[in-house]
């Protein structure tokens, strides 16, 4: 896959005059640079760089832009540090804080003593710095260590950018890998796709081919398989068959793999790089199905959580029936036999499903369930997968309903509510469950306390979730938990042509 170039890459060269801003966390920097082309003119450059120092001679690659507030700027995608062109630049460079123990005065002494030979002394004969007045053994060791660290950062940045990695990701890679950056990337460039959000298979593959990894290497094939399995969730799949993997990986890598793919898959399974289950296909024949590990364990957890054995709640049936009769009179409503059974049964089940097509009274039934739970002094939480569904649930139930992400407190890329910090609830009701994918369901059920009852509501015949899995349909088909299906279409709904066609 070739990336389209939206503009021609421009080059800007100059000496860093000062660092206006530098964020040590992500390397974001705003610097003022003395232009080579127009001496005396300062330009603003923005880039991501691990460390930036005044006096550094730099070559920037990117494009000129015009910021609405700050005006003309050069936005650099990569930057290469060059040897300082003049002794003045070298003196400013060494004395800018680059090297611990070397300030402006010491830098001036060093440059005056060694002149054009200064950088060679730092690179190869640092012990000669002892000839400079004011530098003793202790200070020499500090300078030597600081120079080594600077050179390491410089070499890593040059290596990464030389293989097409932007300064933004080069900074992140160095922050994570440190001095091992070059060795780790050379050993397995595909690890970048796993370790850094924003670097996908295609970027890592570009680096791998640039480094010299053969196009038909097993390392590249394994990375392609892992990418295809991970990407399958975007198409709604939890797993892929052998035939699907063969077709997609061959297309991805432009290779013929029929003779070796099965052996590679077996080896990946042995090394726990993926998971395999033998399942029956539509014809009843067994076939091997391959999972990305995360999806495998999420599916396994959900199946165990839904199917776990729990003791149903015990209530006086006569009391519940009496409450429901009074409730119908008070609300002036009529409930079908299906609805009545659902209301009286759901409140007693550890895990249950309420399903039915449009116009069958799921909302009315849910409202009765919530009111009965309030009568039973249960702490009830309401939620739905999307903001719109949660808002509608709030409006019709008359109680706050949250999105699942808000309920589970999504922060910093993870859910704060989990098995170690569970939800505070006696009864959890989730609406529009046809929208649930396997990952969100696993996260939800991890946060459910052991003694909390759960009700999933939804129409299994609606379109499945965008993510992997068709959770509601699979739970209903499993027959592991009680499912209360509403089929009677009420009079006011019968007049709707849309609802009539939905039930055909």
Image (tube, rainbow, N blue to C red):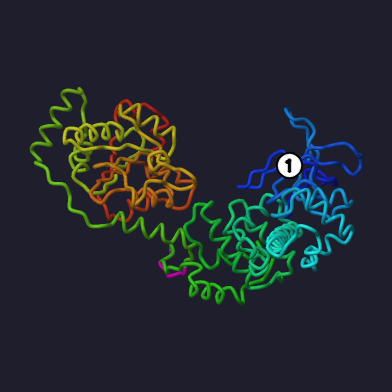
Answer with left or right where residue 169 lies relative to residue 281: right
In this view, the residue farthest toward the front is 133
Q: Is residue 285 magenta?
A: yes
Residue 144 location (% of width, % of height): 71, 63
Which residue lies at the image location 91% right of the left edge and 40% below the top edge? 39
Mark 1 packing: few (<14 Cα in 10 Å), some, or many (20+)? some
As drawn, 193 above or below 436: below
Front-most of 54 and 372? 54
Residue topped by disc 1: 19
Q: Which quadrant would residue 357 be assigned to in this image? A: top left
Which residue lies at the image location 58% right of the left edge and 60% below the top edge? 227
Q: Which quadrant would residue 7 be assigned to in this image? A: top right
As drawn, 78 above or below 496: below
Front-most of 99 and 366? 99
Which residue lies at the image location 27% right of the left edge and 31% below the top edge? 364
- Magenta span of residues: 283-288
Residue 293 location (% of width, % of height): 47, 63
Front-most of 299 and 178? 178
Q: Is residue 231 magenta?
A: no
Name the quarter where the C terminus is drawn: top left
Q: Which quadrant would residue 143 be assigned to in this image? A: bottom right
């Amino acid at each position: 896959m070739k990336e389209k170039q939206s503009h021609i890459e421009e080059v800007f060269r100059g000496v860093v005059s000062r660092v206006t801003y530098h964020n040590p966390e992500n390397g974001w920097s705003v610097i003022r640079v003395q232009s080579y082309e127009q001496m005396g003119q300062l330009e603003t450059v923005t880039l991501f760089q691990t460390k930036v120092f005044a006096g550094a001679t730099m070559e920037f690659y990117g494009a000129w832009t015009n910021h609405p507030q700050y005006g003309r700027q050069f936005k650099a995608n990569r930057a290469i540090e060059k040897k300082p062109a003049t002794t003045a630049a070298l003196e400013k460079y060494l004395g800018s804080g680059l090297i611990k123990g070397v300030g402006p005065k010491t830098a001036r002494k060093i440059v005056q003593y060694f002149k054009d030979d200064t950088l060679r002394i730092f690179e190869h004969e640092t012990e000669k710095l002892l000839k400079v007045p004011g530098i003793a053994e202790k200070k020499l060791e500090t300078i030597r260590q600081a120079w080594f660290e600077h050179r390491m950062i410089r070499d890593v940045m040059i290596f990464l950018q030389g293989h097409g990695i932007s300064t933004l990701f080069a900074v992140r890679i160095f922050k994570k890998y440190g001095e091992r950056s070059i060795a780790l990337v050379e050993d397995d460039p595909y690890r970048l796709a796993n370790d850094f959000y924003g670097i996908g298979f295609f970027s890592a593959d570009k680096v791998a081919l640039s480094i010299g990894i053969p196009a038909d290497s097993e390392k590249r094939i394994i990375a392609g398989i892992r990418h295809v399995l991970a990407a399958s969730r975007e198409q709604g799949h939890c797993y892929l068959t052998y035939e699907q993997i063969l077709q997609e990986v061959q297309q991805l890598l432009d290779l013929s793999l029929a003779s070796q793919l099965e052996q590679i898959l077996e080896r990946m399974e042995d090394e726990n790089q993926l998971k395999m289950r033998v399942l029956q296909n539509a014809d009843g024949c067994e076939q091997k199905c391959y999972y990305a590990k995360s999806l495998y364990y999420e599916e396994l957890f959900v199946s165990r959580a839904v199917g776990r054995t729990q003791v149903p709640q015990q209530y006086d049936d006569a009391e519940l029936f009496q409450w429901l009769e009074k409730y119908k009179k008070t609300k002036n409503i009529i409930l079908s036999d299906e609805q009545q059974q659902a209301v009286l049964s759901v409140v007693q089940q550890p895990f249950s499903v309420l399903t039915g097509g449009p116009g069958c009274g799921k909302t009315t039934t849910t409202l009765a369930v919530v009111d009965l739970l309030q009568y039973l002094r249960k702490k009830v939480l309401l939620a739905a997968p999307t903001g719109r569904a949660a808002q509608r649930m709030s409006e019709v139930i008359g109680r706050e309903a949250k999105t699942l992400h808000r309920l589970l407190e999504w922060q910093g890329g993870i859910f704060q509510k989990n098995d170690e910090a569970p939800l505070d609830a006696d009864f959890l009701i989730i609406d529009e469950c046809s929208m649930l994918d396997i990952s969100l369901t696993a996260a939800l059920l991890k946060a459910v306390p052991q003694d909390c009852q759960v009700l999933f509501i939804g129409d299994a015949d609606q379109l499945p979730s965008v993510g992997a899995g068709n959770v509601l349909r699979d739970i209903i088909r499993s027959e592991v938990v009680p499912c209360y299906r509403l089929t009677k279409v009420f009079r006011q709904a019968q007049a709707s042509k849309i609802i009539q066609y939905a039930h055909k």
